[in-house]
Image (cartoon, helix red, strand yellow):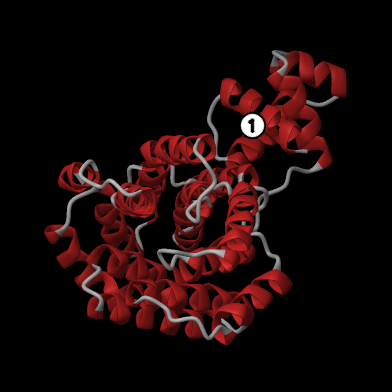
Amino acid sequence: MARGWAAFEECTAEPELAITRAILRHAELAGLLLTGRIREAEAVAAEQHRATMSQAPSACDAMGGLSRGLAALASGLPFAAARWLTEAAARLADSDPIGCAPLCLAKLVETHVVLRDDGAAEQVLSEILASDRPVLDGWTPQIHLARAWRAAREEGLDEGAEAALRAGSSAVRAAQRLVEAEALHTAARLGRAADVAARLGELEAQLDGPLVVLFAEHARGIVDGSGDALDGVAQKFESLGARLLAADAAAQAARLHQRARHQRKASASTAHATRLARAAGGAWSPSLDQLNPPSLTKREHEIAVLAASGTSNLDIARKLVLSVRTVETHLAHVYDKLGINSRAALRKALQDEAEQG
């Protein structure tokens, strides 16, 4: 990137400056997102948009909105992503000097799928497929990924995974190994982890950045059937700012814990996935769709509220005319269902529930 910006300084004509600047800014953002530097990418996207809006109108104005949309989607803010990408797509329809419209529309399809807006996803995907505009080879994998998410939602995981594998093959032909890793990770999330884990391991060894490492760890955790490993992956995704990927890994961890009859671990993973998904406006993924968040009975909730307020077990028992042993049993069930082990964690869990409505 340093050499690219140095070359930019040598440009003199204003149209040339604007287009070169847009290309370099997009390359910088893409590099940050694909290597897992998501919070840094959000800051760069915001600065790119500010810089674009502070300059004279140009054919590249849409790139600022596109950057904001890509960063928002990667960080698990699909409502914001939909707003930015929709605005960028409208501008790109009028002027697209560096050919980014297919990328914008492909990511808009994915965003609408995450938001469960099936009609909008179908409309945008149809627009991509019906367009007679030439598509740069570099965007073809992203179009396959858009089809993968649409298929996973409407036709089933097998069809979605096949489209994700086609995206991976397309990325290989375009010499885009980071995009190949993204596509293979998508296939793993859609049920084909055993088919892609080895290749993701190879890419992990070849490429820099924490995101590819987590893609490989995620696939291995699924293949190994390790809920603990996926809990670790979920925490790492969240630490990068990739909330939707974190929610997906936590949901898969919950399912594996349930199979192993580790109820408290399953509840903790479910609570983690549910919190992240709610923060993203009820985001959809196949794994999140299969979650069954544990619900408290009326009596359990009543006791939980009293316990969270600092009331002792003895005072709860007196207030509700129960034995202390019964109160202890109900609280044990509450802790198991919520995946917690302390009253401090109980207070936080009830606060989160109240805030999320």
Residue drawn at point x = 67 percent, y = 32 percent: 352
Residue 236, image x and y in percent?
35, 43
| Residue 285 visible within the image | no
Instruction: Count numbered badges in the picture.
Output: 1
Q: Is residue 89 at all visible to an observer of this figure?
A: yes
Classify residue 134 by image quadrant: bottom left
Specify the quadrant of the image occupied by residue 200.
Answer: bottom left
Q: Position of residue 39 (x, y in %)?
A: 40, 37
- Placement of the C terminus among the 4 image quadrants: top right
Q: Position of residue 166 (x, y in %)?
A: 37, 83
Q: Quick one: which residue is furthest to the left in this view?
A: 206
Q: Residues within 10 Å of mark 1 (few under 14, many from 20)?
A: some
Task: Determine which residue is flagged by label 1.
Answer: 349
Secondary structure at badge 1 equals helix
Residue sitting at the far front: 13
- Residue 14 rendering spot, x and y as whole percentages: 38, 48
Drawn side of residue 63 relative to residue 230, left or right: right
Query: Foreground: 349 or 88?
Result: 88
Amino acid found under the numbered disc labelled 1? Ala
Residue 22 vertical placement versus 161 (above, below):
above
Residue appearing at x 44%, y 41% in the figure: 45
Which residue is located at x 33 percent, y 59 percent?
Answer: 218
